[in-house]
Amino acid sequence: MKKTFVSLSFLSLWSSPLWALDNFLGATGEMDLFFVLPALAVGFGLVFYSKNLYLRPPKKEVGFLSITPHKKQRFFPVSDQLENMEPVVAALSEPDTNVYSNLSKITLTHKPGGVYLEEKNYKISILINRRRSRRCYLNDGDILDMGELTLMFTTPLPPKEDEEKTLEGSHLIPRNKRVQGRPIKAYPSLIPADTRKKTYYLTKNLTFIGRSDTCDLVSKAKSIDPRHSKIEKVAGRYKITDLETLGGTYVNGRRVEQKFLKDGDTVTFEAVKYTFSLSGNPR
Amino acid sequence: MKTSLKPYLWAALAIVLSSWAALEFVLLVSRQLGYGAQGFLAGAVLGLCLGAFFTGLDGFFGQSPLRLERGLKFGALIGLCGGILGFYLIDQIAFHFEPFFTNPTIEALAYAQRWVVLSLALGAARGGAEQNNLAASRALIASLLAGISAAVLIGLVSGFLDRPFVLRGFSIFLFCFLFLGFHLRFLQYKREHWLRSLNGKHEGAEFELTRELYFLGTQSNDDINLDRYEEVNSTHAKLLKYEYGYALVDNDPFCRTFVNFRNITEQPLKKGDVIKIGSALFQYCTAA
């Protein structure tokens, strides 16, 4: 009983002058709609302003952002005078970060297409997009790994198109495509008109077509000779040659002795019909 | 959460203004009803507004309608309960047990607790909306600290502010900023796995990973919403929890997902891995 009284008196000592009684609901309705409506409007305006502020991506500059895990993100702008990676790493790494490379030999060249990075060390000590490479243009969002330091390159310029993409659609055979991480060639294909049969990919330089089992593309139709025609790769294009058969080989409805095939040509051996496709996409 | 505090400060200001205005409006309307009803309504409105705003904030910022809806529901309901409990019930208790409340200290404490109760309710709503124990405990700790400090500061300040209108505004202001500040402070407490966005709309945002399954894609109910990025499908990939961390799984047979710029179908992630989905870049980080 005594104890509680002591503690209460202590509290009351501590309370009165400083700790005033909360008159939170004292004079209510003091301000009328004159305050309420503008405050509501401003409040809801601010909500959307803050959302825009949150969603607006920051302005892009040319530079490197250090994204090493467990380290603070820091940005280093790249100026035209910058020639190698030394100042970048000096600014972005911490004293205990190990960078196992001769940084003065990793040069940056400012070309009209963007920043060009060259690795001139004897042994490649840097990963660009997690791959070893000696020289490349730096695109927006490229990741550089140098020892324990991870950097991301940012630039407002649009990414440079790969050579792969520009070649597509031309008469040349498309180069490597990747499936499951492994590069595969997109081979040109012969798509049969009969939907029950499989697409044949021209993976070899010389392909024989005929009824014989020794041929590469075997078709058991009666009108086809044992060795009917061949398709060979000549200077990057595909040539079909008729092997002096009775039935003959037809391309786009015309009987041919030999002909270079284009994308979308129909190849016919009397009753059997194929479509030649360069893109390598099966139907 | 984004690394910059600016949007959060503006949002806090917006919350203060709108909830203050709502409170004033309700008090204006219910002027004739008497003190008890006013306490009830004030608590209800404050709890409702603050709860809905604070819990819906993350979903609203992250543009995730699912989280926004869940947050609004949770926040409004639990905030309402907290507000009524803190503002109305204690008034009723003080009214019915008058002799006990004659001591000014006890009375002051009784009035100060309303902020703690309200804050705890809001914290419970915030943690509950996340539906995970870690987030809930984090929110409760932060809200307890925020509530106590807000109660003490408001109690100290109310001696100097003699106009109740100004006091109301100031206490809401103080409470909101303290609440948000403590929550942001405790946001990263004991987190284990998170995804850091490196470009585009979410640049700088860090998505904490606690649940068993996360979907990434353009669909509106994907957990990490990637619309406005190029070449992303709806529900493009998913993150699966396993014993030691998370694994990224390609969810769409027609679209590709990259880890460290290599096409994958399923790949356990390790610290520092760079995930690429369409044009979106993410970095997977783990604690220690």
Image (cartoon, coloured by chain):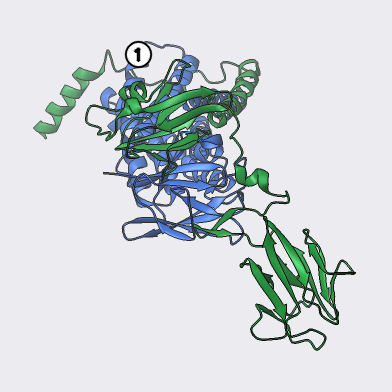
* Element carrying mark 1: loop
In the rendered image, the quadrant that contains the C terminus of chain B is: top left
* Residue B271, horizontal then vertical, whole percent: 34, 47
Residue most toward the right?
A254
Q: Give the position of the N terminus of chain B as an image quadrant.
A: top left
The answer to whether residue A108 is above or below residue A160 is above
What residue does disc 1 label? Answer: B159
In the displayed structure, would residue A263 be above or below residue B94? below
Q: Give the answer, above or below, for where B80 lies relative to B33.
A: below
Residue that lies at the very extreme toward the left in this rendered image? A2
Q: Is residue B228 left or right of residue B134?
A: right
Q: Amino acid at mark 1?
A: Gly
Q: Where residue A217 sits: x, y (%)?
A: 68, 78
Residue toward you, A281 or B199: A281
Say if residue B217 shows up in the picture: yes
As drawn, the residue found furthest toward the front would be A244
Protein chain holding label 1: B
At label 1, counting other C-alpha atoms closer than 10 Å, the crowd grade (few under 14, some 14-19, many 20 or more) is some
**Which corner quadrant of the image does residue B239 belong to?**
bottom left
A179 vs B27, nearest the viewer: A179
Near-viewer residue (B174 or A210): A210
Where does residue A107 sit, x and y in percent of width and height?
A: 41, 26
Give the mark count: 1
Q: Is residue B113 left or right of residue B125?
A: left
Q: In this rendering, does residue B13 appear at all?
A: no
Instruction: Pick the residue in front: A217 or A106.
Output: A217
Q: Is residue B137 above or below residue B184?
A: below
Q: Colour of chain A?
A: green
Q: Position of residue B67 (x, y in %)?
A: 53, 46
Instruction: Tell me what hue chain B is rendered in.
Output: blue
In which quarter of the view is residue B87 placed? Answer: top left
